[in-house]
Amino acid sequence: MYYVYILHSEKDRGLYIGYTSDLKRRITEHKKGLTEATKHRLPIVLVHYEAFLQDANARAREKYLKSGYGREQLRSQLKKLYKILKLA
């Protein structure tokens, strides 16, 4: 399985979008500060992930979510979740 995941930084309230073939290991790395891109943004929370059977599909989804339109659509969808979780 391949995964696209979205992390929310409780420090700066920003999002991080990533891709991995081992979701549990990767999230642990992020939470322990072992990932350069997020170590200065701790603590982080996993707010969403999607599973894919094919690597190419996961990478395409990650690329889309990192695009301007994809990121805007994602923020719009997560805004409702943030209100429920009181993160906004």
Image (tube, grey):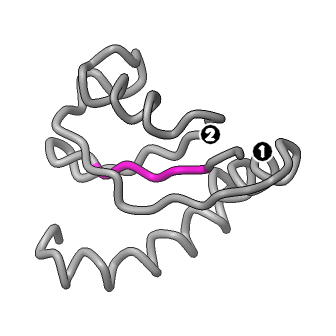
Instruction: Please say if 84 is above or below 29.
Output: below
> Crowding near pointer 1: few (<14 within 10 Å), some, many (20+)?
some
| Numbered disc 1: secondary structure | helix
| Numbered disc 2: secondary structure | strand
Q: Amino acid at mark 2?
A: Tyr
Kindly indicate whether the residue at mark 1 contacts the one at mark 2 (C-beta within 8 angstroms): yes
The residue positioned 42% from the left and 24% from the top of the image is 37
Q: Position of residue 76 (x, y in %)?
A: 45, 79
59 vs 51, left or right, is right
Residue 51 image-quadrant placement: bottom right
The residue positioned 75% from the left and 50% from the top of the image is 58
Q: Which mark is residue 59?
A: 1
Q: Which residues are magenta?
A: 4-8
Question: Is residue 6 highlighted in magenta?
Answer: yes
Instruction: Please say if 33 is above or below 77.
Output: above
Instruction: Please say if 43 is above or below 6.
Output: above
Q: Which residue is mark 2?
A: 19
